[in-house]
Amino acid sequence: MAPPPTAPALLQTTLDAMPPVRAMQVQVVAVTAERVSLRAPLAANVNDKGCAFGGSIAGVMTLAGWGLLLMRSRALGLALEVYVADSQIRYLAPLYQAIAAQAWLSDPACWEPTLHRVHQRGRASLNVQAQVLADNGEPAASMTARFALVLPAHAPAHAGDATQFE
Amino acid sequence: MAPPPTAPALLQTTLDAMPPVRAMQVQVVAVTAERVSLRAPLAANVNDKGCAFGGSIAGVMTLAGWGLLLMRSRALGLALEVYVADSQIRYLAPLYQAIAAQAWLSDPACWEPTLHRVHQRGRASLNVQAQVLADNGEPAASMTARFALVLPAHAPAHAGDATQFE
């Protein structure tokens, strides 16, 4: 029997299954319990000015946050669904290189109480921070986003619920 | 001599020149001074759950806002550059159909004073609203975003400036 996939391989497979994410050519750089790092090449994400398209920057940051919560859930053997609920993004500087995004929990101490609420109520939400840094270390964009963690039986099947599948 | 392109044709050409936007298959539905409407098919923008990818929803709303300000500027013969500076997005319901986004000025009365500031200082910012509606009229997502309008001579050439090219 083949060994289970590593966290980076599992996340890469999940990303590649989504056509718009495949089009952005998003690559998993690293996955730890604390942080997910993703990278997308400029050529697939360039705008009319020759730098990175804001929509791609937002997309890669959102995927990094979504991937962090998905991988943390899977590491515990939990088949939770993860949806982005809302986000605030600041575009700080034009980026003339690959989009390198990292995401981490806004407050790691909230993870356990959030899981407790999920098991009690079927769903709960959690805040994530993300940023895109240029090669020189300067931030190009930052994001704060709230994600919902949902037990599969509580997942919204159709429009009308309060969150959005990511 | 060929006639100048219509606003929808000009916007479509501008969108199609950006690889990540072409990958989302974004189509211009309508352009007026008050509103830009765009549409992107579900198949090119689907996530792992079979509904619209949040990054694509954010991208199409951002492009609708960007397109509105670009087309309003071009209608006045102004070669302003338009950048997204920040955005707040709410994902309200999963969307199992094409992404239909509309954008409009948060306060149309701010347009003239904003243009005045651009001509005085080289740049100014303006707020735009956008939303994605499902076919049944229910909102799937909403966005408030601030865009910068910049005279070409004042446009940031490299990372380090305060806004992001869209």
Image: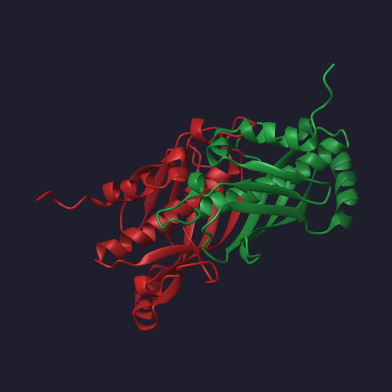
Chain colours: A green, B red
Q: Residue B87 location, x and y as percent?
A: 56, 60
Q: Which of A134 and B95 is in front in this view?
A: A134
> Where, quadrant-wise, is the C terminus of chain A in this rendering?
top right
Please, which residue is most extreme toward the bottom here? B120
Q: Is residue B127 left or right of residue A1?
A: left
Please, which residue is most extreme toward the top here? A1
Q: Residue B30 location, x and y as percent?
A: 33, 47
Look at the picture and state if A33 lies above or below A108: above
- Give the number of callouts: 0
Residue B139 in sight in this render: no
Residue A2 in sight in this render: yes
Please, which residue is most extreme toward the left here? B1
| Picture residue at 79% right of the left edge, 37% below the top | A7
> Where, quadrant-wise, is the N terminus of chain A in this rendering?
top right
Name which quarter of the figure residue B126 lies in.
bottom left
Q: Nearer the viewer, residue B20 or B89?
A: B20
| Picture residue at 88% right of the left edge, 37% below the top | A76
Q: Residue A159 location, x and y as percent?
A: 60, 37
Q: Residue A154 location, x and y as percent?
A: 76, 34
| Picture residue at 46% right of the left edge, 46% below the top | B101
Q: In this view, does A111 lie to the left or right of B110?
A: right
Please, which residue is most extreme toward the front here? A136
